[in-house]
Image: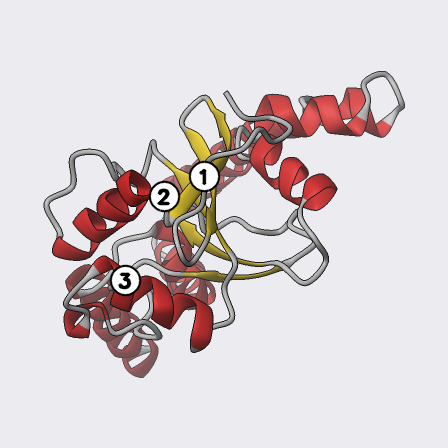
Amino acid sequence: MGFLLTYAAVALGFWFATMQYTRYLIPTLPIWALAVAYGADRAARLTRYAQATIWTLLMLTFLLHLGVGALFALEAVPPVLGGEPRDLYLQRVFPSYAAQRFINEFLPSSAKIILYGEPRGYYLEREYLWGEPYHSTLIPYEQFLSAEEMLRYFGEELGATHILVNEMFFPWRTASDRWVGYLREALDAGQLVPLFAEQGLWVWEIRFPAPEPSAFPGLE
């Protein structure tokens, strides 16, 4: 148990120093569960009062999590039983679905999408990659000296054709990073062409050289 707790503590420290998303703690949950079970077993051997207290706390914890899980599950009952269309349900609970459905319906099957501010690409029926630095080192942002150089890398090295942006988590209008400024420059120059814009969600097409803007389904 001491070895397991040491491992879990090191993993927790690594998590704290890198990317503090709770889902990254999932690999350590079995260890903490074993530690709780071990501690509860040892405590329950002390007195009848301790045993009753431990079991009460465990049951209350179980019921609490069961109730919270049921609340989340109930929201999915209507589409499962056919009372709500799948697309309407997904658009209601997952705002980025509107942009992803647009991509699936209107972009060619050869399209490859770079995602910013939206790592949840499950419903995309096109190739995609998460482009934000610090989450992925695939794109060498520090090496780009111009918007043209960066977009050329997107197209020639990655084969990317479009960009999907969730403005809620990626404030591209105000971010001070140099490479985000390149995105704004490319939009102004027509090298990134908006095809979809709705509730902070954007789909941009990467184009060289800058074309004249044209109408496209879904453009606002």
Place residue 109 in its image quadrant.
bottom right
Of residues 203 and 81, the one drawn nearer to the viewer in this rendering: 203
Q: What residue is disc 1 on?
A: 212
Q: Secondary structure at mark 1?
A: loop
Residue reaching furthest to the front = 212
Q: Is residue 163 left or right of residue 109?
A: left
Of residues 219 and 131, the one drawn nearer to the viewer in this rendering: 219
Hey, what amino acid is under mark 2? Gly
- Does 36 sit above or below residue 2? above
Q: Report how far apart the C-alphas of labels 1 and 3 lie in the structure.
A: 17 Å
Q: Are marks 3 and 2 in contact (CB under 8 Å)?
A: no
Q: Is residue 203 left or right of residue 178?
A: right
Place residue 172 in its image quadrant.
top left
Hey, what amino acid is under mark 3? Glu
Q: What residue is disc 2 on?
A: 190
Q: What residue is disc 3 on?
A: 148
Q: Is residue 219 left or right of residue 191?
A: right
Hey, what amino acid is under mark 1? Glu
- Name the residue at 15% across, 64% down: 17
Q: Secondary structure at mark 3?
A: helix
- Does 207 sit above or below residue 164? below
Q: Are marks 2 and 1 in contact (CB under 8 Å)?
A: yes
Query: Taking the image as drawn, is residue 25 in sight?
Result: yes
Q: Residue 169 at x, y = what percent?
A: 32, 38
